[in-house]
Amino acid sequence: MTNLGFITSQFIADKTYLHGLPYGEGHINDTYSVCLQDSDGVISRVILQRINSYVFKDVDGLMNNIVGVTNFLKKKIIAEGGDPQRETLTVIPTVSGDNYYRDNEGDCWRMYLFVENTETYQTIRNAEDFYNCGVSFGNFQRMLADYDTSGLIETIKDFHNTVKRFEALKQAIKKDKAGRAGKVRDEIKFALDREKDVGVLVELLESGKMPYRVTHNDTKLNNILIDKKTKKGVCVIDLDTVMPGAACYDFGDSIRFGASTAAEDETDLSKVSMSIELFEVFTKGYMSVAGEFLTPIEIDSLAIGAKIMTFECGIRFLTDYLNGDVYFKIHREDHNLDRCRTQFKLVQDMEEKMDLMKEIVNKYK
Ligand SMILES: Nc1ncnc2c1ncn2[C@@H]1O[C@H](COP(=O)(O)OP(=O)(O)O)[C@@H](O)[C@H]1O
Ligand SMILES: [Mg+2]
């Protein structure tokens, strides 16, 4: 059993540990809410997290990313008249001044101030949620628009390098480890037919035509703390995958999961499409804040970025299916194939709607 009291005392020595309970519905780290009492009897909470060091190998680099970005955000938030302890995460250092604690078993722990009077939603319930999502992630990018990304490490190497993802697919087809290639000829053809798309964003970034931005890379709704009263996004959290990348990575991935009319693993493909209404709602929210810093090339990349992010996700599912389901957890036979098919259906739908998507982006710029 983990001794949460002992771990807590490595960060906070002048308060009494009362209890710690599992908190939230994150899938990557183990999150606890820890209750403390000070010498005047005042009770407060903090967030204690065991960092998933299986996924994130370089915890030093990861925590440096988070501290760098949140300190920068705090200065911006103060300059804009906001509350720096509420509108971004605050890392509480250990008593010896480190930004995380490694226990005897090698597990790494970090502590954050608890942002009170907020809630998180697990799924997008309506258009307003998705609009707010666009505003929050757009604002996150806006405030970090002049952050020097050369100081950030890639916490997951080549995460959105679509060229390398495509190369991995080709390898998987060639090796056909699980003997499944014959069964997915249509999907393989769909992927290979789009080879010309895979280098578009990488080329724009590497040639310097498009700037590297701080991207969040996990733009789910439950990574935004929402104010209980105003119902507006207060704080973007879960900064483990903050990395240098293209602005359209976050925009595109948000559209991929949030504007789809069906679940990622829906088997009835007739239910799967990209809702143009939801696309517009998110774009409106995102552009209301991002419109002021994005370059014309970045604005131009948003609609195509949505398609490329979706395509990339689809080829990752297909690659894993061909490799024998070694990366993504599956809960039924052919689960990765079902997931691949929904993504490819979305890609096809986006191709048909591309002109309209671009028109909508331009409407809000
Ligand atoms: N500083 C915080 N204040 C309040 N709640 C938080 C804070 N940090 C995390 N949470 C809650 O814990 C959940 C999981 O945290 P998160 O960092 O997103 O972990 P994971 O990487 O596992 O998704 C969040 O969805 C949110 O509900
Ligand atoms: Mg999370």
Image (spheres, rainbow, N blue to C red):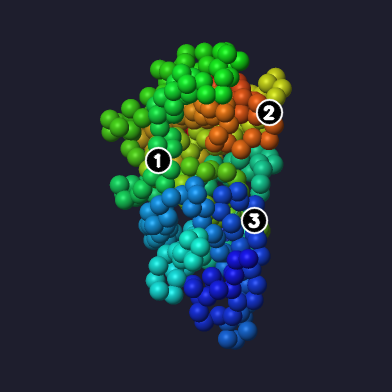
- Residue 139, horizontal then vertical, whole percent: 47, 47
- Residue 169, horizontal then vertical, whole percent: 47, 24
Q: Which mark is residue 24?
A: 3
C-alpha gap between disc 3 and disc 1: 27 Å
Identity of the amino acid at label 1? Lys
Image-based side of 27 in relation to 11, left or right: right
Q: Earlier in the sequence, mark 1 or mark 2?
A: 1
In this view, the mark in front (1 or 2): 2
Identity of the amino acid at label 2? Glu
Query: Which quarter of the figure has residue 298?
Result: top left
**Figure check: 92 above or below 129:** below
Most extreme residue toward the left is 207
Q: Which mark is residue 229?
A: none
Which residue sits at x=49%, y=73%? 10
**Figure check: 103 above or below 313:** below
Ligand 1 found in image quarter: bottom right
Which residue sits at x=61%, y=32%? 259
Identity of the amino acid at label 3? Gly
- Name the residue beneath numbered marker 1: 157
Q: Is residue 319 visible?
A: yes
Q: Quadrant of the N terminus?
A: bottom right
Image-based side of 37 in relation to 197, left or right: right
